[in-house]
Amino acid sequence: MAGLFNTSKDILSKDYWRVLRPSWILTLTVLIALAPFFTKPFNMDDPLFIWAARHIQIQPLNPYGFDVNWYGTTTPMWEVTKNPPMLCYYLAGIGKLFGWSEVALHCAMFLPAILVILGTHKLARQCCNSPLLAALLTLMTPVMLVSSTTVMCDVFMLAFWNWAVVFWIEGIRSNRASRLLIAGALVAMAALSKYYGTSLIPLLLLHGVISKRRLGWWIAPLLIPVAMLSAYHLVTQYLYGRGLFSDAASYSFSANDSTHFLQIKSTNILTALAFTGGCLAVGTFLTPLLWNRKQLILMAIIASGAGLILLNTANIFANYGMIEGSSKNFITVQILFWAVGGVSILTLAISDVWMRRSPEAWLLCAWVIGTFLFAAAFNWTVNGRTLLPMTPAVAILIVRRMDQICFLDGQGFRGLKVIPLAAGCLLALWVTRADFLFAKATRASAEETYRKHANGGGRFWFQGHWGFQYYMETLGAAAMDAEHTLLQRGDIVATPENNTNFAPLGPELVVLREIILAKCPRWLTTMKGEVGAGFYASSRGFLPFALGDIPSDRIIVCVVDPQIPPTSITAPTR
């Protein structure tokens, strides 16, 4: 009874609620920020995770043992996916309990988002004076909010990542083996959620070496993820004849054109800078307050000069299609603006380690610079999802910089100081809404196309993937297979232009039946090559999101010409 009484006194104490209240504030803030988007339709790579989760319910020990048509031909799932299945098992459990609706799965993904923010707050308490602000800055970035409204593995991985770092730092400081063992297990979970989680192994090793200045028993917990990944590699090699961990690593290199490697990587650096500044927009808006005038001018010269040189010499616009609703000059201005922010963010990491030289400073610097280099030089494309892992570290670095320059003085955030913070938050919500509307337009276009043309007499086919494929197949349409589909006279083929892995059908095969226009977000979008937006793949655009007069998405509906001899009617090859 005495113990129970003491516990009750602890709960009623001010110190207990002082510690607990930020967690409740942050949890509520995450729910409020994400609640408007819990009905978001599935889009982009969401279907791959959902299909794998459904299959796991049937064959839990063989997560990728089925075929999909994702690249235009029917292919084994283990060849298509480049992510481990941890999230898919989580979604399988959610689907079993609550069904497969958008609401059920998105609400399930709120939990990883909450854990990311709570983990950032816990980590920031060890690294800066305003952990609550650092956690809120992490949340109110375009990349965090947009990624939290998908059912892909990025936020799920980051939740394990953040807490692995928290337990690791606590374990190193206190020499507690239990904390380090938990950190090692969390690193393994992060790596089995997304392969980039393996980056935690050298990152935490670096922090340990700098802290302890020698190797010791503390390194042993890092063998846990090594053992888990080795076992996963052997199991997938047994199941599929190929170890999926090494297969994903080789994909990043094979996806790049080796004949133009230097040019590709140099333009990727500019693109990665623009993505960094845009995905973490609040850091860009705070740039004038974090640096003095000379530093700002130098950053602007470096980013703008390098950007203009690359834009002119590499002629990167030549690799993209027609610009509509914007202009090369306007896209260039956006690239250079966000690139300055990207330079500022990278400079924060380098400046912090230069000034402090502490183990945590080295950890944060390696965290940010390593993520940037992976996105710019090693990943198959630059995208927001690849840059997401640096978000907590950047938020902490911003607050540490504020502490250093006495930004957080007795006057708080009065006057001009609150403007960049508010602008960053509003932009993050605007970008998230634009991505939400993009997903809604994709689903609506699939439903309208099917409703109008599925009963047109001939068989109904479609090309394209992402959310369009998910909803078309849900309605009952069939995806064209470039190797096996034999078109017949009168068949209907629908092709969304703002999509991937499709082959245009020429006039020698089909005649146009209708062009369906899908209403898109009006002035800002996350995925539209015509205005330079490519949040999910920079092969579509140089920017994570772009302003402009956004043109409608078009779905081209054609019918196989009844005048064409049957022997010449075959599916196009890629």
Image (cartoon, rainbow, N blue to C red):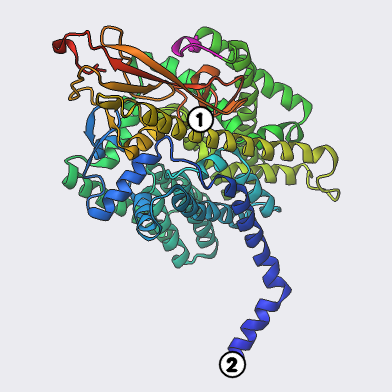
Between 47 and 152, the residue placed more toward the observer is: 47
Q: Label 2 amino acid?
A: Met
Mark 2 and mark 1: Cα distance apart in space: 57 Å
At 26% across and 18% down in the image, what residue appears? 574
Dot 2, crowdedness within 10 Å: few (<14), some or many (≥20)?
few
Q: Residue at (44%, 12%) from the top-left corner?
A: 319
Give the structural element (helix, strand or loop) at label 2. Answer: loop
The image quadrant where one finds the N terminus is bottom right
**Residue 301 place in picture, x, y as percent:** 67, 18
Q: Report whether residue 520 is seen.
A: yes
Q: In front here: 339 or 219?
A: 339
Secondary structure mostly seen in magenta is loop
Q: Which residues are magenta?
A: 315-324
Position of residue 111 in the picture relative to residue 2 (left or right):
left
Residue 569 shown left or right of residue 476 in the figure:
left
Splitting the image into 4 quarters, where does residue 61 fall?
bottom left
Up-down relation of residue 391 to residue 256 (above or below): below
Give the image location of residue 135, x and y in percent: 63, 50
Locate residue 186 relative to residue 418 in the image: left or right.
left
Residue under label 2, please give it. Answer: 1
